[in-house]
Amino acid sequence: MIWEVFRQEKTGGYHTHCGNVHAPDREMAKQFAAVQHGRRKPTNSLWVVPREEVGEIDGEDVTFGGTTDKSYRWATAYNTTGADAREVAESEDEQATAEKQRGDD
Amino acid sequence: MNIDTVKERAGPREFSPADELPREYREAATRMIEFHANSEIMGAYLERPFIRQAPSIDRKLAFSAKVQDEIGHGQLLYRAAESLGVKTREEMLDDLANGDGKFLNCFHYPMESWVETPMIAFFVDGAAMRRQATLRRTSWEPYAHAMDKVCFEEGFHVKHGEDILSELMSGSKKEQHMTQEAFEEWWPRIIQFFGPTDDKSTHHDFAASVGLKQQSNDDLRNAFLDQYIPKARKYGLEIPDEPRIRERDDGTYVVEEDDLNWDEFFTIAKNEFEPGLGQINGRKTAQEAVDWVRETIENDASAAGGHAPQAAD
């Protein structure tokens, strides 16, 4: 049985997918995950999830967007005057980064 | 974990559903996040009619995207609240419909004209974002994670709201005049967004001591004024005489709290503000009207052989 493994680096962070392990049950999956994925990189917590419980949808099943111009959805589309609040500027930066990454695909 | 340990350990994103937390913490966090979730939903309902009234196709697209985002934020937050194990999502939504659910003061006031939209979309959202940015460091991890996504999206809302304000204030004399009037009406409510002063705040001390809340009402309000008074002036809005706002020597601002209508504020807080009942009931009617959609989805899911409830459930 295959178990997908998600690693959280430190308290409060996100559990992100880092690989999978082959194990007969949940207990063994946790042990294998700890050995294979929790050793070298900083780890606070691991999740193991049976692969067949993971639902997947991809670009062949659905259009994820990015083909229609939705520039009106981005802070970067609006030119305003004066200094923006710090958190607004941060959000705009994050959006600009996301927008750029979209172009890379 | 007992409450002393919670206070000792309290730090950004410190506690997750994996921790056993005292009821006191879970209840305080539920109250705070449920309020926040309800506010996202009620804000969306307040703004929704303006998708139809938007003066151009660009505004219509942006406005509907924004309203859609806010409903999404509500969904994220109900998840974060539900993970505390105090109230179910269903209970929170029902409470909102039957008038027990509490939400932000600003969303109790009816909104009638397009010139009012930047009061919410720029000023209230700007105030909300100021607060939300600090909540990325809250101690309940699912709440902090929800704030990451909310703040990511919210920058667009604020800038779009500002863009509407900028357009109105560079429009005709009549538009400028109407916008100024709307601003005068909304300004005191916007200042009250941050709640009562620290000494009158009922929940602040506990929420702060367990790391749920990161900044006091007064600090947040002042930080908001520092940022948004100059913005308002830049677009040609005149700051109303009341409430009186003092400029400190260092150029920052502080508001004269006694000039604000706290009776109205606390009536609103109890969901007893007459003009605001339309908002609550409108949302209730909308929820009932789409009941069949929820039922169809749920019946369909179990018919499709998902995790069908057992006969004994």
Image (cartoon, rainbow, N blue to C red):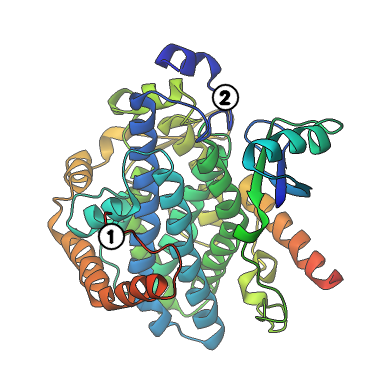
Q: Nearer the viewer, residue B100 or B193?
A: B100
Q: Tag 2: residue type?
A: Gly
The image shows a total of numbered marks equal to: 2
B147 left or right of B287?
Answer: right
Vertical side of B86 occupied by B106: above or below: below
Q: Nearer the viewer, residue B34 or B278?
A: B34
Q: Quadrant of the C terminus of chain A?
A: bottom right
The label number, if any, that marks residue B11 in the structure image? 2
A34 left or right of B313?
Answer: right
B226 left or right of B33?
Answer: right
Q: Indicate the chain on which mark 1 is placed.
A: B
Q: Is residue A83 something that shows in the picture?
A: no
Q: Indicate the chain on which mark 2 is placed.
A: B
> Residue placed at 56% from the left, 68% from the top?
B160
Q: Are marks 2 and 1 on the same chain?
A: yes
Q: Is residue A82 something that shows in the picture?
A: yes
Q: Nearer the viewer, residue B233 or B301?
A: B301
Counting from the top left corner in percent of width and height, residue B96 is at: 25, 55
Counting from the top left corner in percent of width and height, residue B270 is at: 18, 44
Q: Residues within 10 Å of mark 2 (few under 14, many from 20)?
A: many
> Residue placed at 27% from the left, 78% from the top?
B292
Q: Tag 1: residue type?
A: Ala
Residue at the spot of label 1:
B311
Q: Nearer the viewer, residue A47 or B306?
A: B306
User: Quick one: label 2 or label 1, which is nearer the N terminus?
Assistant: 2
